[in-house]
Amino acid sequence: MTAPDATSPAATSAPTTSWRDGLAVYLQPRVLIVLFLGFSSGLPLALSGSTLLVWMRESGVDLKTIGLFALVGTPYTLKFLWAPLVDAMHVPLFTRAFGRRRGWLLFSQLLLIIAILLLALTDPARSPFYVALGALLVATTSSTQDIVVDAFRVESLPESEQAAGMASYVAAYRIGMLVSTAGALFIVSGFESTGITRTSAWMWGYVVMAGMVLIGTITALVATEPEQSVRAEAATQTETAFARVLRAAIGAFSEFLMRKDALAALAFVVLFKFTDAFSGTMTAPFVIDLGFSRTDYAAIVKGVGLAATLIGGFAGGFVARRYSLATSLWIGGVLQAVANLSFSWLAFVGTSQWALAFAIICENFTSAIGTVIFVAYLSALCQNPLHTATQYALLTALAAVGRTYLSSGAGFVADITGWPLFFAVCMLVAIPSLILLVWLQKRGHFEALGPVLV
């Protein structure tokens, strides 16, 4: 494969600054707002994903059914279909009171709280259909929130704050996921220790998670509407709602598809995080099957996993700032693929908490690096405030294809191969994305994006 180019013009780094200046950027109000919105975006993902899978496994649901539950993430892959509505339509009362982006943000968070509460009332052992329906509602409202948060982040941060913003967003996103995985498991165990039934403990755990969404709601109330959004709204205020929706939909797709090697770039977006998604679908059931308790898993994920996520997020920001976009993608892609072998090793070692901690550190650290770099790449592809939400939603929806559809067969693969070989397969599925990376690099794709100050 072609060796990555660390001096590509497309990766012109930001000017060198002192560590005090670098730290000060992270304390800028816009960056802090993005940080808390990142937490709000990361929180609900596991509630319809890995945390729900632990609940189902404890309720006796078989591995094949658990693997198919990845399909409830379909809204994350289809959110670009209603993203033009978010770009162009007004939410009655909310838009007038809070603005174009903040109005949609508050509205989606209200719906998300309701959806999580409905999921809390289900029982995987007795009514898997209603569990799937509740999870689908959570995924739909969560993906709508993601549409707005992504647009808000891209539009609100100036170039000088993009690096800190992306690193903070990804780190907080991963913390949100940890809260809704390890944090939720701790809370469920706490409720269960009071003597209530396991089903009731899970219900109250999800109720607490619904309350955590209010962190994002408070952030949205404190934030100010992005200037780019205000200008875009003023430029289209004389148009009808239908015309605005049409402009957002057609503009976002046509602008992207007219670019050189657009289809290859879209395929790369689909496949880059697939190695993470394929293994992540089965990580929680794997740990439970090894014999670890729910509390053991939660303690390690919340402790060393959180630390690894934070360090990995900021390490990703350093890599993306230090090297070209192409080189950064090479580093992130290879690291997140190889990290799967730590779980293969864990399968041989068995119930060793040190081995589990090592595997969790590898997974969280490398995944956070890959995610920061990937977010930098997606952000570089979105450049028009008239349809930022639609275009970014299209790209992140495609990225979710791996997590939702391609990963839905992970349970069948694990059932056939056994755990050690399964995670080796998870590493190998990264190869197609690296081949596409070679192709795009040779075609000058990353140079064509212009200077990327990440």
Image: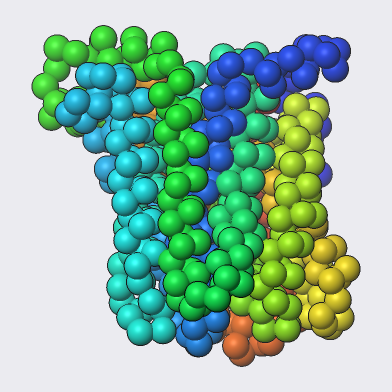
443 relative to 393 in the view: left or right:
right
Residue 138 locus on image (x, y percent): 37, 56
Q: Is residue 94 above or below residue 291?
A: above
Left or right, residue 386 beside residue 212:
left
Residue for point 68% across, 18% down: 27
Q: Establish if 183 lies above or below 28.
A: below
- Quarter of the image containing the C terminus? top right
Decide if residue 345 is in sight here. no
Q: Position of residue 422 (x, y in %)?
A: 68, 78
Percent position (x, y) of residue 165? Answer: 62, 26
Query: Which residue occupies 50% across, 87% down?
Result: 60
Residue at the image position 59 percent from the left and 43 percent from the top: 173
Residue 343: x %, y % from top left: 77, 71
Q: How many marks?
A: 0
Q: What residue sits 19% from the left and 25% below the top?
A: 93
Between 260 and 93, the residue placed more toward the observer is: 93
The colour scheme is rainbow
Q: Does residue 277 appear left or right of residue 313 in this picture?
A: left
The part of the image, by quadrant, that contains residue 85 is top left
Q: Viewed as shown, does residue 421 lie left or right of 146?
A: right
Which residue is the extreme one toward the front? Answer: 194
Instruction: State the residue in front, 249 or 148.
Output: 148
* Residue 420 seen: yes
Nearer to the camera, 114 or 344: 114
